Image (cartoon, helix red, strand yellow):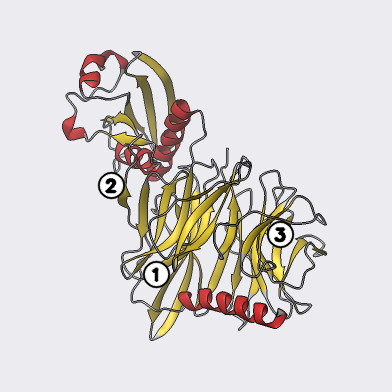
């Protein structure tokens, strides 16, 4: 019985790796944006094109980036500028009656001014129904960093309306796959949350899996097969320096950072069976957290950083378990199907998200940790690798759209979605970066 379960689970692991070995041609580094579904409850907002003083760099307009950010959250529905009756840039030019007639709840106006090598932004957000200003600030960025300024404004607008910090200034890590000279080419890339300004951090002919962000956003841990076997590396993004941290016999996989950035959870099979370990990165000391004949893998810290979610087949098939503290008896969380894997909890301890199989298809689902209620969030059929935004309001995962492998972002309740496909080729293994304030 034990051998059968181990063999079955090993086949599942190998199958997921095999998916990465499907070679497509000529993947473009930058992701595209494709809105696929909006939410019925989205709040109407007008992001008025900002007035411009001086020579503003060509390219995406700041207001367009803000509008796209807010729309992609699934919580806002932006009014196209072509339908606006006027283009105000300050309070005195805002006629609330016009915006109410257009059905708008909020209106954002502003002005950009160039001063030497800086762009200064002045912006104001108004509640149309109350005819009140709810946000008014100034911000600046270098001429070459206009997108960061736009994401900053998006974060401020989002927080002013929802009370929750925005996540538009965060980063994404992901893996793309194409072929070069007849050989596979894997690239670990980092981009803005909307897929723009992507940079290649590692390129290899061998698979790269499971990127994971350090809490300060300065390092990535990941699994690389470049030595012919799975090995865990830690990669400093500013310098490019890489450190091999787990190269034990057998499986070295699924790294996950602690809240203080001093240790990693990981799956190791160095003693013959896949178990969950914690490694102190300074001393390299290992602490074994699970000890069971079944395969335990895909660990993730819970919201308070004390307990651990993980996948185990100890009940006969992969299910999600939670260990409240090291050494505690794990509690099974999922029961809705025979396959539930790769747990990713939210930041408040309310939900855990995971890959759920039903009727031959793989979806992203969540379970309410208080009530045990399970909700299927996605309508696509080959979904994997969920990662929760640091504010808990969005979720990114990898899926298929026709023959394309794409990343899709949904609101945490599944009510809205947008996809980030590479122009060609495969893109997968997304990891949402931390919120740096």
SS label for mark 2:
loop
On residue 323, which mark appears? none
Q: Single out the mark in the foreground, 2 or 1.
A: 1
Q: Single out the mark in the foreground, 3 or 2.
A: 3
Label located before the other in sequence (1 or 3) = 3
Residue 146 locus on image (x, y percent): 38, 41
Q: Which residue is mark 3?
A: 264
Q: Residue at x 71, y 75 (%)?
A: 247
Q: Which residue is mark 1?
A: 426
SS label for mark 1:
strand
The foreground one among 83 and 114 is: 83
SS label for mark 3:
strand
Q: CA distance from mark 2 to mark 1?
A: 27 Å
Q: Which residue is mark 2?
A: 59
Residue 430 visible in the snapshot: no
Label located before the other in sequence (2 or 1) = 2
Q: Residue at x 28, y 25 (%)?
A: 104
Residue 217 locus on image (x, y percent): 59, 50
Q: CA distance from mark 1 to mark 3?
A: 28 Å
The foreground one among 198 and 357 is: 357
Looking at the figure, which quarter contains the N terminus?
A: bottom right
- 282 vs 121, left or right, is right
Residue 89 locus on image (x, y percent): 28, 23
Q: Residues within 10 Å of mark 3 (few under 14, many from 20)?
A: many
- 216 vs 170, left or right, is right
């Amino acid at each position: 019985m034990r051998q059968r379960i181990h063999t079955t689970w090993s086949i599942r692991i190998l199958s997921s790796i095999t998916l990465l070995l499907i070679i497509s041609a000529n993947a473009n580094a930058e992701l595209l944006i494709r809105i696929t579904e909006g939410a019925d409850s989205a709040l109407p907002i007008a992001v008025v094109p900002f007035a411009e003083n001086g020579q503003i760099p060509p390219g995406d307009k700041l207001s367009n980036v803000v509008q796209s950010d807010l729309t992609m959250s699934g919580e806002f529905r932006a009014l196209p500028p072509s339908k606006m009756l006027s283009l105000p840039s300050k309070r005195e030019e805002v006629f609330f009656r016009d915006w109410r007639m257009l059905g708008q709840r909020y209106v954002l106006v502003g002005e950009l001014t160039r001063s030497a090598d800086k762009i200064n932004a002045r912006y104001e957000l108004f509640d149309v129904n109350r005819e009140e200003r709810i946000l008014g600030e100034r911000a600046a960025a270098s001429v070459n960093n206009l997108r960061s300024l736009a994401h900053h404004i998006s974060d401020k607008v989002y927080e002013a309306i929802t009370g929750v910090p925005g996540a538009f200034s965060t980063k994404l890590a992901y893996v793309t796959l194409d072929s070069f000279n007849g050989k596979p080419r894997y690239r670990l890339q980092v981009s803005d949350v909307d897929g723009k300004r992507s940079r290649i951090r590692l390129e290899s002919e061998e698979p790269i899996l499971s990127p994971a962000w350090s809490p300060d956003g300065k390092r990535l841990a990941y699994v690389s097969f470049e030595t012919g076997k799975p090995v865990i590396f830690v990669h400093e993004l500013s310098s490019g320096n890489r450190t091999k941290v787990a190269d034990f016999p057998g499986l070295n996989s699924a790294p996950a950072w602690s809240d203080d950035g001093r240790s990693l959870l990981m799956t190791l099979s160095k003693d013959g069976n896949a178990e969950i370990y914690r490694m102190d990165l300074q001393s390299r000391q290992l602490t074994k957290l699970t000890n069971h004949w079944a395969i335990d893998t895909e660990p993730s810290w819970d919201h308070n950083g004390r307990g651990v979610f993980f996948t185990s087949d100890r009940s006969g098939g992969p299910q999600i378990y939670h260990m409240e503290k090291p050494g505690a008896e794990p509690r099974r969380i999922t029961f809705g199907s025979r396959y539930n894997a790769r747990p990713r909890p939210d930041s408040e301890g309310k939900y855990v998200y995971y890959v759920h199989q039903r009727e031959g298809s793989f979806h992203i689902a969540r379970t309410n940790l208080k009530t045990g209620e399970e909700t299927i969030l996605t309508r696509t059929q080959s979904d994997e690798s969920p990662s929760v935004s640091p504010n808990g309001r969005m979720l990114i995962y990898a899926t298929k759209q026709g023959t394309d492998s794409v990343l899709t972002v949904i609101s945490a309740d599944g009510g809205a979605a947008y996809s980030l496909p590479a122009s060609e080729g495969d893109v997968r293994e997304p990891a949402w970066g931390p919120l740096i304030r």
